[in-house]
Image (tube, grey):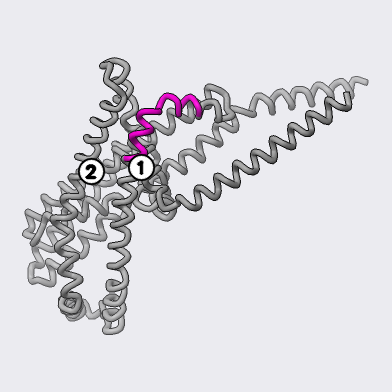
């Protein structure tokens, strides 16, 4: 009996030591591969979105795994190439001009600020703040170029990893089911919540951005904004950020129209942007995201803020998912242990009743 207890203790000790080594190695690996986390999360996101289609191709259509994975990868590359193309053709030339003519751009900004000051009586931009803006832009652009390199690297990692997730998807899912220490119904809840939230954010948010960009483009075109396509594209990009996202673009555009001597157009665009563009954003987030994944607007707002700080651009998807995971894990905790708590309470009540009877 004593030897049996000693063996159990030794096995437990070995288990703890081995688990500690696994956790330690895992932490080292994550810390060293942290730069690739957006690419890894992106691959997981794309797999979840297209998982059903992939299984349909290999199980119903009898496609080979490699061919099905290659076709889906090609489709994703084409889809992602569209915003990249617009970014290169619309935004890149402006960034290049900004780098080459920083002083000229700041003179134009300063002239616009002076006109606003004459009209309103308030100092919009001082000499010191103009100098600070110039310095910040000069330091920010190299960082932007570096981040572009990181985005390309993570895209390559994402597609590379996605191919192997497709090919080994069934084995990976079976392995995860064995590793997750939960009841089957709670594993199903976790899986369904993951699919629902990823689809809502990975599909719903881009759709909202496209809708809002198109609506803004109509307004810019109607009220005679120069380079309306560029401003519409930027409005769609900033629509990723809830509440005040698009205002970052259309408010300066309205001010620019006003300072250029078009007060009527500026007033009309302001009303259009506030009433139409703004409400389209609000209604789409409440209706589309809630219909696709029953996502509460507060989860979207705080999730985007949290996700951008942790994961970068891909955090727009995984930020809300992280908050939803927290809520789901609380539900799972209650489901996992509520029965145990109830049994313990009943046992305690029974003991107390027996004690009182005695």
In the picture, measured across the screen, residue 1 lies left or right of residue 117, that is: right
Q: Can you say which quadrant of the picture contains the N terminus?
A: top right
Residue 164: image location, x then y, percent: 37, 33
- How many numbered circles are shown? 2
Q: Which range is magenta?
A: 160-175
SS assignment for the magenta stretch, majority: helix
As helix, strand or loop, the secondary structure at mark 2 comes to helix
From this viewpoint, which residue is outermost toward the right?
358
Residue 174 falls inside the magenta stretch:
yes
Residue 171's place in the image compared with 89, above or below, is above
Asked whether 310 or 11 is in front, the reply is 11
Residue indicated by mark 1: 42
Residue 158 falls inside the magenta stretch:
no
Asked whether 38 or 243 is in front, the reply is 38
Residue indicated by mark 2: 80
How far apart in space, not on screen, are marks 1 and 2 (Cα)?
12 Å
Within 10 angstroms of label 2, few (less than 14), some, or many (20 or more) residues?
few
Q: Earlier in the sequence, mark 1 or mark 2?
A: 1
The answer to whether mark 1 and mark 2 are in CB contact below 8 A is no
Asked whether 164 or 98 is in front, the reply is 164
Residue 85: image location, x then y, percent: 16, 50
Residue 347: image location, x then y, percent: 78, 23
Within 10 angstroms of label 1, few (less than 14), some, or many (20 or more) residues?
many
Residue 86 visible in image: yes
Indicate the quadrant where residue 22 lies: top right
Residue 276 visible in image: no
User: What residue sits 11% from the left and 54% below the top?
Assistant: 229
User: What residue sits 84% from the left and 22% below the top?
Assistant: 353
User: What residue sits 66% from the left and 39% below the top?
Assistant: 18
Indicate the quadrant where residue 358 lies: top right
User: What residue sits 31% from the left and 46% below the top?
Assistant: 156
As helix, strand or loop, the secondary structure at mark 1 comes to helix
């Amino acid at each position: 009996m004593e030897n049996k207890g000693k063996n159990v203790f030794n096995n437990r000790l070995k288990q703890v030591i081995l688990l500690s080594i696994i956790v330690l190695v895992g932490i080292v690996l994550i810390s060293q591969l942290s730069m690739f986390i957006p690419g890894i999360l992106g691959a997981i996101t794309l797999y979840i979105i297209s998982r059903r289609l992939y299984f349909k191709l290999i199980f119903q259509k009898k496609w080979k795994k490699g061919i099905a994975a290659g076709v889906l990868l090609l489709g994703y590359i084409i889809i992602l190439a569209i915003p990249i193309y617009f970014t290169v053709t619309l935004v890149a030339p402006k960034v290049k001009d900004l780098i080459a003519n920083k002083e000229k751009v700041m003179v134009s900004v300063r002239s616009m600020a002076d006109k606003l000051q004459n009209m309103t009586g308030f100092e919009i931009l001082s000499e010191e703040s103009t100098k600070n803006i110039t310095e910040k832009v000069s330091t920010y652009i190299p960082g932007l170029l570096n981040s572009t390199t990181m985005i390309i690297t993570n895209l390559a990692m994402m597609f590379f990893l996605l191919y192997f997730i497709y090919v080994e998807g069934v084995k990976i899912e079976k392995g995860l089911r064995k590793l997750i220490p939960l009841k089957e119904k709670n594993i199903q809840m976790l899986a369904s919540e993951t699919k629902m939230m990823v689809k809502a954010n990975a599909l719903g948010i881009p759709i909202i951005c496209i809708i809002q960009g198109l609506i803004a483009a109509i307004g810019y075109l109607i009220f005679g904004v120069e380079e309306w396509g560029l401003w519409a594209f930027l409005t769609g990009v900033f629509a990723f950020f809830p509440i005040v996202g698009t205002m970052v673009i259309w408010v300066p555009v309205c001010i620019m129209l006003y300072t250029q001597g078009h007060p009527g157009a500026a007033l009309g665009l302001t009303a259009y942007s506030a009433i139409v563009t703004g409400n389209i954003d609000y209604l789409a987030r409440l209706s589309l995201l809630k219909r696709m994944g029953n996502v509460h607007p507060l989860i979207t707002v705080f999730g985007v803020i949290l996700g951008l700080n942790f994961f970068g651009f891909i955090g727009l998807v995984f930020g809300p998912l992280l908050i939803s995971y927290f809520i789901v894990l609380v539900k799972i905790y209650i489901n996992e242990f509520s029965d145990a708590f109830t049994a313990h309470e009943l046992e305690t009540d029974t003991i107390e009743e027996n004690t009182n009877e005695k």
